[in-house]
Amino acid sequence: MYRDQNKQGRSCVKKGIDNEDSRRKRADVTISLRKKNREQQMQKRRMGTVTQDKSSNDENSNSINLKCSNQLPKLTKSDIRERLKNVDLLVKGVNSNDPNERLKATVDFRRMLSVEDHPPIQEVIDCGVVPKLMEFLTFTSEQKLQFEAAWTITNIASGSTSHTKCIVDNGGINYFVHLLGSPSSEVREQAVWALGNIAGDSPSYRDLVLKTQGSVQRLITILSHKQVKPKITMIRNATWCMSNFCRGKPKPDFEHIRACIPILADLAKQNDSEVLTDACWALSYITDDQTLNNQKINAVINQPGICARLIHLLQHGANNVQVPALRTIGNIVTGDDKQTQKMLDQNPLPALLGTLSCQRKNMRKETCWTVSNITAGTSRQIQLVIDANLISPLVNILKEDQFDVQKEAAWAICNICSGGTDAQISFIVSQAAIPALIVMMKLHDPKMILVCVEALGNILDVGLKLSGSSETNKFAEIVEEFDGLDTLEELQRHENEEIYEKSVKLLQKHFDSEEDDGMGMGPEVNENTGQYSFGFGEANPTPQFAF
């Protein structure tokens, strides 16, 4: 809680419970959000059937006629078992000098690997055809064979890491990076798909792809329409592939993906929901920034119109688009005050007010986290949150929502108590923040108890100032009215030493509480004996308890 990263103009900020920054990066928030939401954008994709876009006929005169493979009936499990029994014949076909035999056998392998459930990837690898399939990728004079081989290898790479390793070990990355420049749109698209699967397998394979000369630049060329205008399936696959270039921990070298940012910003302005989903996820990975001066965030927010576009996407009809757009906005406002202000200048708060009341729990949680990083900023930024009427719904979440959402709302409120003006703190008191904080102090999360106790202390300090010459602290009266005094006294029994100390100090300062007045208070030390004594002074010296 307590200080923002940019300390300019914030010398009056109250000290927090430790030295961590008010703004909390994604790593400080539960990872379950990432895991749950990211399932909506798979790291790997297996290609089942191809439906040729009518517009593709206008795209390229070298377009492959895929009719021979697309219109074949789907294989059943029994069909696959039968083919595996006769796999030697397929292997023989793949190694044949007859172009028709090579193509037919490759199509059969591809069809076996295109089934949805439990494709026999390992069985195909074990029969030793992968090196030959790789060779077929160089057969530019047989584009149907080249395409079918690329499709088969792509589906092998969609399997486990050991399956992907087989493709990498056989030089698959170099082959497919080269094919990104193929004159055939279908082969190019298949190369994009294969590289997306390899990069999506693990950070180590992602980095191998990124370090391969031409991988990023050729993908950018495809997406920037410098060759020919790609059909929508190509744009979708290339955007997904680029998002896999940007994802994963440890993070990719920023210099390898920096050139992707302008393309991703343009893709985020398209209308296709699949493209928007993957472009926004990619931007969210980039803006999850731990670098000095948040250079990644800077590179994103400097793209013309991107902040306004992300805010607009919060109102998109598809949840798959809203979630990564919100994540990216949340990541941006973890930057310094100037970077946060650049987002605030586009007026995201009305849209965040909408997502704060969303029925989906994770959207509410993400929104609270985002707002908490705004309220960790300047008093001007806190005032924008207040003026946008976000305080009342935040307090309601504190009172009524599920615990993991409540915690994020508590950070948003407590950051105001740490860095807000007296007037701003008084305002959140008027919105029933004190009873809500007391509720949070009764829960079993030591971190949140500390944060809320400190926030309550800051509130009471403001109440003390406002009381002036009067001995009545109206904020202290509210605390007592809502069982806060009993809660603080109970916290003196808490096993966490810091919670014990802070509750004692708060009681002594604002409620005329002395250590010998209640149970659980710290024992006094006898100056003469050096022993602990409990509640017995000179007036009653007889009962002494020594350890």
Image (tube, grey):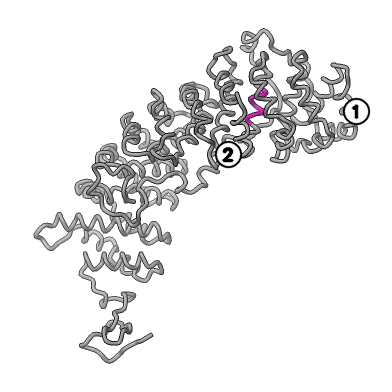
Most extreme residue toward the bottom is 542
Residue 526 part of the magenta-drawn span: no
Q: What stretch is highlighted in magenta?
A: 190-196
Q: For the residue marked with disc 2, what is the amino acid?
A: Glu
Please tell me in which quadrant of the rendered image residue 471 appears. bottom left
Position of 467 with respect to 224 (left or right) is left
Q: Which mark is residue 153?
A: none
Mark 2 or 1, nearer chain start: 2
Q: Residue at x 27, y 92 (%)?
A: 542
Viewer-nearest residue: 479 or 458: 458
Determine whether 521 is above or below 339 in the image.
below
Where residue 312 appears, as percent x and y from the top left, is 40, 27
Residue 191 part of the magenta-drawn span: yes
Q: Quarter of the image containing the C terminus?
A: bottom left
Where residue 509 appears, as percent x and y from the top left, is 22, 65
- The residue wearing badge 1 is 89
- The residue wearing badge 2 is 39
Give SS at disc 1: helix
Q: For the residue marked with disc 1, what is the amino acid?
A: Leu
Give SS at disc 2: loop
Where residue 122 appears, as percent x and y from the top left, is 78, 38
Q: Residue at x 28, y 57 (%)?
A: 456
Where residue 399 appears, as percent x and y from the top left, is 36, 52
Task: Give the total of numbered labels.
Answer: 2
Please tell me in which quadrant of the rendered image residue 108 appears. top right
